Every structure is written in structure tokens, then in C-alpha cells.
Amino acid sequence: MEYRYNMRDLKFILKEWLPTEEVLSFDRFKDIYSIDDVDSILTEAYKVAREVVSPINAQGDKNPVKFENGVVTSPPGYKEVFQFIQKNGWGSSSECIELESGMPLMLFKAANEPMVAACPAMGSNIKLTTGAANLIIDFGTEADKSRFLPKMLSGDWQGTMNLTEPSAGSDVGDALTKSYPTDDPRIWKIKGTKMFITAGDGSICENTIHMVLARPPQGTKGSAGLGLYIVPKVWVDEDGSLGKPNDVATIAVEHKMGLNGSATCMLNFGENDGCYGIMLGSAPDEMGRSKGLAMMFNMMNESRIGTGHNANNQASEAYALASQYTSDRIQGYIKGERVPIIKHADVRRMLMDMKAHTEGIRAMIYKGFYCLDVANNSKDKEKAKECADIAAILTPLIKCYGSESAALMTAEAIQCLGGVGYTKEYPVEQYLRDSKILTIWEGTSFIHANDLVGRKMTMKNGKPFKMWMGSIKNFIDSNKNAAGLEKEFGTLARAYQAAEEVWQTIGSWQAEKDKKRELINLYALRTLFVFAQLYVAMCLIDQAVVASKNLAGLNEDHFDLNFYKGKVASARYYVNNSLPNVFTVAELIKNADDTVLEVPEEVLIVG
Amino acid sequence: MEYRYNMRDLKFILKEWLPTEEVLSFDRFKDIYSIDDVDSILTEAYKVAREVVSPINAQGDKNPVKFENGVVTSPPGYKEVFQFIQKNGWGSSSECIELESGMPLMLFKAANEPMVAACPAMGSNIKLTTGAANLIIDFGTEADKSRFLPKMLSGDWQGTMNLTEPSAGSDVGDALTKSYPTDDPRIWKIKGTKMFITAGDGSICENTIHMVLARPPQGTKGSAGLGLYIVPKVWVDEDGSLGKPNDVATIAVEHKMGLNGSATCMLNFGENDGCYGIMLGSAPDEMGRSKGLAMMFNMMNESRIGTGHNANNQASEAYALASQYTSDRIQGYIKGERVPIIKHADVRRMLMDMKAHTEGIRAMIYKGFYCLDVANNSKDKEKAKECADIAAILTPLIKCYGSESAALMTAEAIQCLGGVGYTKEYPVEQYLRDSKILTIWEGTSFIHANDLVGRKMTMKNGKPFKMWMGSIKNFIDSNKNAAGLEKEFGTLARAYQAAEEVWQTIGSWQAEKDKKRELINLYALRTLFVFAQLYVAMCLIDQAVVASKNLAGLNEDHFDLNFYKGKVASARYYVNNSLPNVFTVAELIKNADDTVLEVPEEVLIVG
């Protein structure tokens, strides 16, 4: 089977749906990009994804990273592809939004999307390097920047983010890694063990720049006490040249369910007392507080939306593969004729389900990227703030609903293939395995659900969330008579009402305490699904309105006819078949069953 | 982490919930088993599962079956465990229900359950041997039986079922494998290729007895033309001794997402024109019809229920592991104290969800086994027929809902573990991979949904289905005042109404044709979920009624207190949180959106 990707939908989003020209008109971009570049950039990106990136995907799965005598080796082709992407402007140099060379996020992500889908494990290598570089761009000195950035952006070095430790997973504040001052106030000794470090090693680059959270001696307890340090694997002299090894050792590589091409490492810093890091930000204040975690979370919205995006890219590719297989595979009869299985109603249902979900979630994701672009670049400060708020609300929805949905969609793609879908001879099951981690990475689904109900709904006295809900209501009120979509608007309006009730109930629980307040946590994930599905439905209907208009002028043999029909169908399917989950959850929340909280916990333990 | 299994629930089912004594009183069993044996059989079975079987599970995953120079080698320990189970009466000799030594299904399956959960790949080796032996028991001559059975039941030989071919998957009738008559009317020459043959090879036994579907020259088209043949890998002389190799070659072994310890083979029969099989049943009739497939489907209900059972066993073990991890793992704070993560509401919700689903589906499964036991053994012919019908209705519900649910529950178990759940160092993710095939095996989920709406609802003029629905209504009417469960009975009654509406709508579509009739296929899977969830809810509430009674007499420190509380909690949780999906689907079916059928199929293809 052949790697193929739904590039048409990306072009629709950028050129027909979202106000991309507004973003391209910002000072930073206006002399560099125009809307006419979208086609050529996406066409070229797709070519790279197809010809350069996709060939290494199955290989990396079948020949996982190796760990022998302390040395980690990546699968064949990884080094070359990493460097190709980085050197040719398809990676970190375009992704780091605060670089001069940075592209608008919505454009970069559209170009990046087919590449991540072509090899998710490679996508992680790039993304982590971008994350590390962004920290240096935002919080490093000019000297730090010239010392590290050129080679991090050129593909010569890679970067990592080091938060997790054996006893500090979801709760980063329990980290035990320590930092000790030296004579130079910016240079600290580092000592500790980090685990689950994605792309932590792999012989792809001559050096790896680790961004490490560690607690200085005066650091207070919890996450507030953590500082952030640039810890190169091989020391980098001030002129950017390589020094001697910096006492960073890979002590284990995880054997994982998927993402076998990407090394998930356990790293030891300073085992021989010779590991040094360069402090980002300032030394701890008199209360022992540092801003390490806050700095790491600086790009949090972008990287969390990015995780949902990654999941959806994988689900999209699984869908593309399933659509290809089901239109080729002959099995069963209809009216006495053997037919490709795409003719069977249930197979079509699964394909439509994957199409509607991946397109709808993609729409929500690009709304998020658009908001970040405006927030980061608009001179209209009011609008920038508003967009930053919307991005903050969309972040947990995208991360959580995107990754949870990918788990279902990739399983559905396997189901479309039947028995062969379970084999590694076909590329679909790898997407289920590669994407499964994304409900855990960058905060588990619950952490995001909690972020929504505990933070995003109430931030700034709840004003942004109210505005966001208002924008959905406004969309419904202004468009509800759109020809051919009246029924869908009716359902969307009812879903809005149901969501509003959920919002009120959660609000009433926020005023309570103890058991009643625990209900918020108990229903948080389901609550998140309500708002995510409402928003996805709105985006799909909005796209269908645009598609209907475009469709009106086309001849029956126009090459885009089926695309627009498909956009209308996605909206219709999603609203009629998926959105009604909102009504069920609204009822559940009204009912507020608390069995889970009431049972003694021994009841839940099999033993 | 340690393998543990919820044996208490099995004892509850056999000793406190279902009328097991009725089954044990049947002539075949009454002198062999009594209800007092249940405890010791289950205790011993659990010991075998824990000490003998579970140690090979992770090993087999990490060291998949090997295929070198035409020879397939199973992972370390497989041979020994297979033979231990078969020789000690824990396998086929007890599972073959028509053997003198056969156990009641409900008792055998309860003993088998912890072993399948301990190593699903080994479970397949046993199950396939049972399937092949059952065919010889039911359709072989006395000579066939004495020739093959002793060594198939002793662990010396294994057995397989050969239906699928490269171009004949869900549609077995397209099989191309041929049989040719010889001078001996029972001996036929076999020629063809079969694929996806589970446990098709593996150097576990000195011989493998393949049961092969093939089409004789006069065989008609489609499945009616297929005969069934006993095709030993090594020829077996009439006295049961081994002859020369029978020209059966393994030409490939699948690389799969899971079940790595079990060899899924592509087999060539008669490549050198020297493969012979012994015909089961009679030669084709004058219309070219044989009963090969019908014979293979003879034990269909049992093996399909068995597939749902297998899935639920795996989900149960994944839940047991998650419960163990979450009660040990310290992370996060509640009121300033670091706590095991089982204290967090969302983790408890996931555990409760897995508990309720696996217990509820187990309850439905054992209803099915009970019905098969009565159908197979009762002298009361009326009751036997009625139970056979109920088993026929429950079969698609168990197979499809059991396997689809396992896919969600095993993913939920990974989520409970967080990052380590994604690694192979922990035994949970293997269950997701090992169980995923079960939504495809023994007929895909849609095939079973179609079986429900297209066959089981309408068989015998719809009488059995009406009776079955009546039994649910009757349960509700007779128990609705059960103390403490009034709310749950109310919801169950509403769910029954919703299901009745769905039943009527499907019935009305059955009278239509073309597009309208296609709606049945389009909504088949969701329809199946409605009836499965209704039945599971009923079983759980029924169990809760029993548990409530037992609970009433117990002191606060009784060792069974939490078990009974847990049974009540499972019912409450499921009815309040999962069952309401029935209302959503009922609405969807009323709405009958046909977008999926209306779109041109090109719309669904990513190209």
C-alpha cells in the first residue's frame, strides 16, 4: 500500500475557510509569504513526505532503536531524513515561531502535517528539537543563542525536554534531580535521573542539547522550586565548538508499544560528578522559587495543540490507507456481483466516521493555530488577547479529544482491513500503536479535562469562556437558515443548549466542596467531550456552508465536486451521528451518579 | 507486576447466581461433578494459570514464533505448557462437550478463563485443537475417532481449522482450494493455499491435524460446494501410528500486532501433488452440494461465544493489572498527602468502568454457556430448544460487544498506568495488542451485527427473539421494587422501551427494499450495542439483587463484604453511565440519517 495524504483538505482550510491572508499580512510575514505560496509549499511538502519521509516509517517500526554498550542507534535512514528536513527548512528553523525565519504556525503545521503522518517517530525528533530551541530563543541570552541555535536549527544537533523522573510523572513537582551552584553564576552542576526522554539519544546528530528541570539547594518544594538548565551531551564552548563529554549517560531505552524508531531514554546526569548546565532565567528568589517549569510551559499551548495535531495526522493517514484498501479489496456480493468492500454499508460507515472525525478535529486544530498566530503577531492587542484566550480554551479540547479520537479511528481503520489489518505487512496497525501514547504524553487526557473544568472555564472570572460560548451561539444564530443544513443547525442549537446546562452544573459544583466538588473531576473527561464535540460540529458545519456555496457554481464533472460534497457529508454525518453524545452526557451529568466516589477503594482492586 | 485474576466473580456466577446445580444434575454429569467441586476446580485452575501458564506470556510476546527454512518454532515454554494443559485435563479433553470426559461448558470455561487470561496465545493453541477434535467427534466415523482423537486429546498432536484463503476472507464461499477423488471414496487429494491459520504450525507437537474446506470437482459455487477433510500434516495410519509426511507446507508466518506466541500460518496443501485428506460427512449430492461449511459451523455458537469470552478474559486481566498498579503507584497530592493514584477520581472512574464492563459481559457470557449446557444435555426437549434459541441470540451480542468492549477496556488499562503502560516492561499493552484481532476473528463485528438484525431477530418468525425480549421485560416487572435499586430499575425499564422501539424500526425496514433496507446494515452495529447493553445491564442488576441479599446478613468485617458491595456498584455504575447509550442510539435510528449511503463512494477515498 502506498502513503497518500488528504492535502486537499489542508488547502481548503488555508485558502477557502480560515482568514489566512490576515495572518500573512502581519509585519513579520507580509514580505515573505503570500496566499499564492500555499499551493506550492504544500505540494512540495507532500513530495518530501511521500518520497523522503514515508519510506523510513515501517523500517523504523521493524528495526527499533538499539541500545548496546551505552550507545543508542536509530533505525536505518533516520539520520539522513532528520538532516534533510532540518537542513531544507521543513523543520525547526520554520517551526520556531520567534525566529526571523519562523513561518506562520498555520502554514508551517499544514506543511508539517503530511510529514508527521508519514513517520510519526521522526516527527518527534524534529518537534523536540524545536521545543528545546524555543526555550533558548525565549529565555536564553544572546550568547546562548549564538552558541546553540545555529547547529540546533541546521540538523547538526538535536534537542530534548527533560521533565519526567521515575517518581515524578504527572506530578512534575516531585522531581528529585538537583542542581548545585559553581563559581560561575550561570553554570550549575546537575545530578539526577530523567526518564521517558523522547528522542533522548540515537546517534542521529553529533550533539544533543537537553533542557533539564532540576532543583537548586535553596529550591522550595514542588514545581515552583525547579530551575531550567541547558545541558549539552557534549559540552559546547562559547564559540559554539564542541568540548568534552558532559557526563550525560543513557542508561536505558524503553521497549514500547509503538514509536519504535524514536529512542525513549532514561538519562543519567552527573553520575561521575562532571555534568554541567547553563541556567535559563534567573537564580531562585528569596523564597526558593525558580521559573523553570513556567518556562517549559511557555510554549505549552502550541505543543499541546501539536500533540492533538500529531494524533489527528496519524488517524488521517490510517483513514487514507483504509480508504485505499477498501476500494481495492474485492469481497462479498451485491446483486450477484463481487464488489470492492467499500460498497458495503458498514465499511462506508467506518470510512465516513474516520473522514468526519479527522476533518472536524483538523478544523478545530487549525482554528487553534490561527488563534496562536494572531495572538503572537497581531498589532491589535485586544484581538491578540482574545485569540490567546480562545487558543487557551481550545488547547485541552484539541489535545484530549484529538488523541482519544485517534485511538478509536486507528482501530476503525484496522477493522476496515479485516485480518490483514492485524498484520505488520500492512501499515495500518502501526498507527494505532504509534498514536496510543498521545493520550498520555503532554499531560494525560484527565489532566486536560481538569485543565478545562478547573482552569479554562473559570480563568479571568470566566469571561473568556463565556465569550467563546457566545461565539458558538452567535454562529448558530447567524447561519441557521443555511440552505440544506437546517436540520443540522437544529441539532447544533440543541447541543449548544445541552452544553450550556453542563457548563452551569459544573459551575454550581465549583461552589461546593468535598464529595460534591469531586463530581467535577469524576465528570471532567466527559465534560471535555461535550465542548469538543460541540466545537468540532460547529467547525464542520461552518466548512459545509462554505463548501455548499462553492459547490453551487460547479459543473457535474468538475474535479472538486466530490471534495465539496464530501465536506457537506462530513458535517451532516458528524452532527447526526456523533454530536448526539452531547445529549447523553448532559443527562449523565444531571443524574450525577456518584457510585465511583462512594465505593470503598478495596472494591476496585482485584486481588 | 503479578498476574492475578478475579476468581471470586466466577465462583459467584457458578455458586450464587446461575442454576449450576441444574446443569450438574444432567445424566452426563451427575455422577462426576457436584457443586462442591466448583471451589476446588477453580482454585486448582487458578494455580495452574498462575504458576504454569502466566510465566510464558511476556516471553512469547518478546520472542515471537520463528520461521526458518520452512520450520516454525514456538517461543520457549510453549511446548511444555501446551502439553501440561492437555495431559492434565485442563484442555481439549474437558472442553470437547460430546466426549464422555467433557465437562459442563459453564464449569470448563470458568476453569479455562484464568488460563486464557494468563496467556491468550496459548489459549488459541488449545482452542483450535478442541475445535478440530469436535469435528471428528461429531462427524467422523468410529474408525476416525480411534485413529485421531487419543493423541489429539493427550497433547501429542494439535489441530487447526482451515477456512480463509487469500481471496476468501469474510466470504468463505469464494474458496479456491480443491479436492479430487481417489479410488478410496473417503480419501481425497487436496490442493490449495490457506491463510491466517491460527496455531497452524509451531513444533509443539509431533503432528498437526488440519481440518480443511475444499471444493470437489462437482462442487457447486459458493459455500454450499465446499467439503470438509481431515488433513494430517504427517499421514496417520489406520492404527493411529504416524506414516510419511503429507505434503503440507508452511510457506509463511504472519508478523502480527499481537498474539506473537501463536503461529498464524499460510499453508500449502499438495504443492507436490501428494496431499491427502479424509472426507468428513458425505460426498457431494447431485446438485454438487456438500455440508463442509455447515459442519464447521456446527459448534459456531460455542466458538463465537468463546471468542467474546477470550476478549473479556483479556480485558479482565488488564483491569486486574491496572487495579494493582494504581493502588501501588504514588503520585499527586490530596489534602497535602501524597497518595496512590487510585485515590484520584478519574482513575477510580476508569477502574470502575473496567470492573463493570468485564463483570457485566462475563455475566452475559455465562448465561450463554448455561444455555448451551441445557440445550446440549437437558431431557426437557422444550427447554433445551428454548435455551438453544437464547444461546443463538446471545452469540452475536457476546462475540461483538465482548470484543469491541475489550478494545476499549485494554486501552483504559494502559491509561491507568500512564507512560509505563505504553512500555513492554509492563504487561498491560500486550493485552490491547493480543485482543485487537478478536473484533475480526470468527466473523467481524459487522458480520455479527448483521447476524443479529438479519437472522436472529427474524428466525422462526421472530418468536425466539420475542420470547427473549419478553424475558427481559418480565425480569424488570418482577424485580422493580428491589430495595436500593429502584432508580436503576427505572432506567432499565426506559432502556427496554428504547430497545423495543429500535426493534420495531428495524422490523419496519425489513419490509422495505433498496436504500431503506440498506439502513439495516448501516445501523446494524449500533443496534447490536443496544441489545447487548440492555442485556448486560439486566444481568448486572440481577447479580446486584442477589448480592444485596447476601450483603444484608454480613458483619462489617466479613471478608466478602467488599465483594458484594462491588457487585452492587458494578450494576449501578453500568446502568447510570453506560446503558444511557441505548437512548442515544434509539434517537439516531429514529432520525435515520443516510448520509453514508447517499455520498458517491469517491468522496470517501483519499486519493
Image (tube, coloured by chain):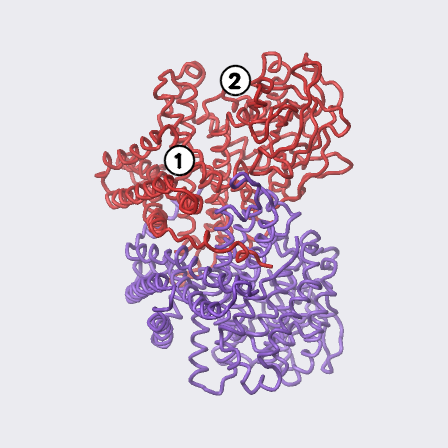
Chain colours: A purple, B red
Q: Nearer the viewer, residue A304 or B583?
A: B583
Whether residue A223 is visible, yes or no, is yes
State the residue lying farthest toward the left.
Answer: B481
Q: Mark 2 or mark 1, which has the lower sequence index?
A: 2
Whether residue A124 is visible, yes or no, is no
Host chain of mark 1? B
Q: Tag 2's secondary structure? A: loop
The vertical placement of B14 against B527, above or below, is: above
Q: Which residue is mark 2?
A: B99
Q: Which residue is mark 1?
A: B364
Name which residue type carries label 2. Answer: Leu
* Coordinates of residue A7 in the picture (x, y in percent): 59, 66
* Coordinates of residue B22 in the picture (x, y in percent): 36, 21
Give the quarter of the figure containing the N terminus of chain B: top right
Name which residue type carries label 1. Answer: Met
* Label 2 Cα neighbours within 10 Å, binned few <14 / some 14-19 / many ≥20: some
Q: Nearer the viewer, residue A224 or B588?
A: B588
